[in-house]
Structures are given as C-alpha cells and as structure tokens.
Amino acid sequence: MPVDAEPDLYKAISDATRRVILDELTDRDGQTLFEICGRLTMKHGLASSRQAISQHLAVLEQAGLVRTRRQGRFKFHHLDTSPLRSIVDRWPIDGEVPNP
C-alpha cells in the first residue's frame, strides 16, 4: 500500500472540530447544517461560523466519511465509517485478521 493511499481520510480525522462533528453524527445521524451548528455550540461550546462548519463537512464528505442527501431545501448529513476500514486494514487491531 502506498504511503499516501488515503490522504483525504487522514486529513479529515486530523482536525479536532471534524472529529467532534463525526461524534455528533454518531450520536444522531442525518442532521442538517443548522442542527450540527447548534449541537456544536450547545454541547461543546464551539462557536464556529456556519461557513466554517460547512467547510469542515466538505472535507469529511471528500474523505467519504459523510454522505449527504437533499430533501426539499434541506441537506442532511450522514456518517459513513466504511473508509475507516482502510486504517484497520493497514494497522490491524491485535487479534484481528486484516481483509485481503
């Protein structure tokens, strides 16, 4: 496996705010940008602008960790952890057999 096989994935999870966004989507999947911003402010005291959170979501989407779905004028964000499999395949957890 090349050293930089998943650069978007590593970049996405390297940022603390993006990890908190992933935590929030784990807690409650299918949120709008407005809902995510509200939860980040209320639960974590993160007062980032909507634009900043939107940019974080774009990085997560580019890495494949977030999928979006449009319904009317709303855009819903859904967590997709399948890209994380490449990390476990690269560095297996003790006792776990990596996927071929």
Image (tube, grey):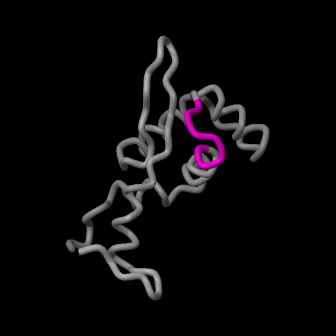
Q: Is residue 56 above or below residue 2?
A: above
For the N terminus, which image quadrant?
bottom left
Res 99 → quadrant:
bottom left
Q: Could you tell me which residue is drawn at 71 percent across and 32 percent down? A: 38
How many numbered tags mark residues here? 0
The residue lying at 25 percent from left, 65 percent from top is 5
> Would you place residue 38 above or below residue 66 in this image?
above
Establish if 13 lies above or below 99.
above
Quick one: quadrant of the C terminus? bottom left
Q: What residue is rendered at 35% in x and 44% in y? A: 62
| Residue 98 magenta-highlighted | no
**Is residue 28 found inside the magenta-colored segment of the image?**
yes
Region of the chain picked out in magenta, as a range: 25-31
- Residue beneath the point at 64% across and 41% down: 28
Task: Judge by depth and name the residue closer to the eye, 76 or 47.
Answer: 76
Q: Residue furthest top?
A: 72
**Figure quadrant of residue 87:** bottom left
Residue at the limit of the structure toward the bottom, as seen here: 95
Q: Position of residue 86 (x, y in %)?
A: 34, 66
- Which percent across, then down, holds residue 76? 51, 28
Q: Residue furthest left?
A: 2
Indicate the position of residue 53 as horizontal and vertical percent values.
56, 36
Q: Work out whether residue 12 or residue 92 is closer to the camera in this orientation and state it.
A: 92
In depth, the one of 79 and 37 nearer the eye is 79
- Residue 95: x %, y % from top left: 45, 87
Asked if residue 85 is positioned above or below residue 55 in the image, the reply reads below
Question: Would residue 75 appear left or right of 39 to someone viewing this image?
Answer: left
Of 15 and 26, the residue lying toward us: 26
